[in-house]
Amino acid sequence: MVRRIDVTGAGGVRLAAWEFADPPGNDRPEASGTPGVLLLHGLMGRASHWESTARWLSGRHRAVALDQRGHGQSDKAPKAEYTREAYVEDAEAALEQLGLGPAVVVGHAMGALTGWQLAAKRPDLVRALIICDMRASALGASSQREWEDWFKAWPLPFATLDDVRKWFGEDDPWVERRNPSRGEFYAEVMHESPDGWRPVFEPEQMLESRRTWVYDAHWEELAQVRCPALVVRGLDGELGRAESQEMVRVLPRGQYAEVADAGHLVHYDRPEAWRAAIEPFLDGVLTG
């Protein structure tokens, strides 16, 4: 079962949180005080991208995935509100309003950055952290320009969802080899409009969100994370081995895991291998 719970984020923004629970009723994990897990997607993602992870987590833990502001079914707030502080405050509000904390926070890409910034700010709310394929180094102005050009290259609107899958899985210039799971990932963030299929988010809001962190390094905040933290990288992802191991060194209680044959979308590319990589860590922090 999946149920939606509305959360009020920073500045009154309405956020959609999705709780995965089986079975329903009084046997839900929340009813028995089971430890909570908050799942934070990356830029352009949505809570449903965590479905596979949330399903197996819900057997023993209270698993909630959040549509972050501007994403999924959450409000598309004004551009000026797409700040790092707003994203962190939204996650903080979700933990408090849902009664999840202290929780394990699992973040992918931008969601991982939100997770470690939250852990540094509110250690009382975060008992452990999983960082999936997010760099601590500054990416710089050239990276932002590349993203701006990439959004302009999207052949919007797409006539069908199959066209979405094909472009993002095969025809996108950023795709080095055919990647059906990438096509499926982007098909999940499209909705049907009168002229065809378009993203559920506003591309300019995504670029604004990225501008708030792409020019800066985030090592100092990483060093302030006092809880156990696991850094996970796909071997073909964006986070390199040397940087990931330095992140583990900087984290006071850092650990490392990697997933073979996975790219940036680690949890989506290889869900079973992803589970094998993170489950021992979760077992240690949640039941140890």
Image: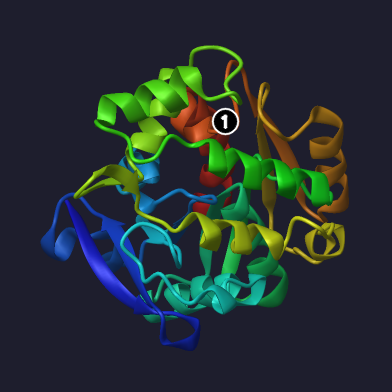
Residue 136, position in %: x, y?
79, 50
Q: Residues within 10 Å of mark 1 (few under 14, many from 20)?
A: some
Could you say which is closer to the camera, residue 262 or residue 22? 262
Residue 186, position in %: x, y?
40, 36
Q: Among all residues in the image, which is located at the extreme left?
A: 25
Could you say which is closer to the camera, residue 229 or residue 17? 17
Q: Residue at x 31, y 49 (%)?
A: 58
- Based on the displayed image, in which of its 4 quarters is residue 215 positioned? bottom right
Q: Residue at x 45, y 48 (%)?
A: 45
The answer to whether residue 167 is left or right of residue 276 is: left
Q: Residue at x 72, y 36 (%)?
A: 256
Residue that badge 1 annotates: 277
Query: Relative to 8, does residue 69 appear above or below in the rendering?
Result: above
- Based on the displayed image, in which of its 4 quarters is residue 233 positioned? top right
Residue 28, position in %: x, y?
22, 60
Q: Among all residues in the image, which is located at the extreme front?
A: 195
Asked whether residue 56 appears in the rendered view, the answer is yes
The amino acid marked with disc number 1 is Ala
The answer to whether residue 2 is left or right of residue 138 is: left
Residue 97, position in %: x, y?
39, 80
Could you say which is closer to the camera, residue 155 or residue 243? 155
> Circle 1 — which element?
helix
Asked whether residue 132 appears in the rendered view, the answer is no
Q: Residue at x 80, y 65 (%)?
A: 221
